[in-house]
Amino acid sequence: SAVISQKPSRDICQRGTSLTIQCQVDSQVTMMFWYRQQPGQSLTLIATANQGSEATYESGFVIDKFPISRPNLTFSTLTVSNMSPEDSSIYLCSVPIQSGAFFGQGTRLTVV
Amino acid sequence: QKEVEQDPGPLSVPEGAIVSLNCTYSNSAFQYFMWYRQYSRKGPELLMYTYSSGNKEDGRFTAQVDKSSKYISLFIRDSQPSDSATYLCAMSLLNTGTASKLTFGTGTRLQVTL
């Protein structure tokens, strides 16, 4: 198993600003995923964070809007840039395992 | 059409009832199927993981996969108020240990009443 600590747990931000979400894992992992969970929507993969290389983004998500860092095998950050109310969502980091995936507790972001 | 369809509920059942949660999917290439439980203001927690068609049982939980019908189910026996949560189905093309992307349903909100 893996313990994933994510912070902040929630935040209210002004439009036009940026928020950086941190994800810390208690063991070294090769891949980390970032998901978005909008109200009434399914979890949607934003990008895969690889240590030592650029993140891989899914269709509809771009690096300028969601820059990701992965400085080592236990830590990653996701930044939501130039926020608008449409970015209000829960953001989750995830670690894949042999039989599924572990998730952090999520960051609930409200943009006003 | 969404790749994975799941009735959002809410589904309300009395304590002790058998709960049936279901998902349908369109991509016949999915091979690995999961069920997650998500309590309010928490991250998803893995409940069941199955490969291909068949049944898997773990305590009060049984997962069924029918690949011919592209239909998966989660049954909860002797439901408890503590089972009240949102249940998400998820699936992947490859073994998740290879960091295969997960495709999720929207989740079904379950309420077990006393």
Image (spheres, rainbow, N blue to C red):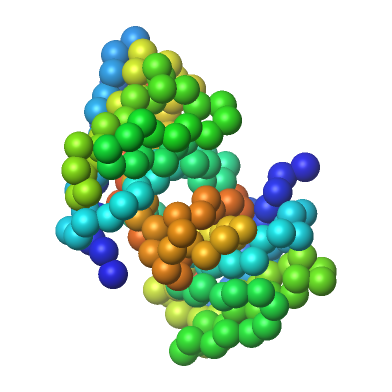
Choose between A47 and B70: the one closer to the eye: A47
Residue occupying the point 34% across, 41% down: A50
Q: Is residue A38 left or right of residue A8?
A: right
Residue occupying the point 77% across, 54% down: B26
Where in the figure is residue B89, as x and y percent of width and height? 58, 61
- The count of marks equals 0
Quarter holding the N terminus of chain A is: bottom left
Where in the figure is residue B51, as x and y percent of width and height? 60, 74
Where in the figure is residue B73, as x and y percent of width and height? 66, 73
From the viewer's perspective, is residue B93 above or below residue B55? above
From the viewer's perspective, is residue B15 above or below residue A101? below
From the viewer's perspective, is residue B7 above or below residue A59? below
Residue occupying the point 34% across, 18% down: A81
Residue occupying the point 54% across, 87% down: B57
Where in the figure is residue A57, as x and y percent of width and height? 47, 32
Is residue A8 in view from this perspective? no
Choose between B36 and A56: the one closer to the eye: A56
User: Residue farthest to the right?
Assistant: B69
Is residue B30 in view from this perspective? yes
From the viewer's perspective, is residue A106 above or below residue A112? below
Residue A66: image quadrant is top left
Choose between B19 and A92: the one closer to the eye: A92
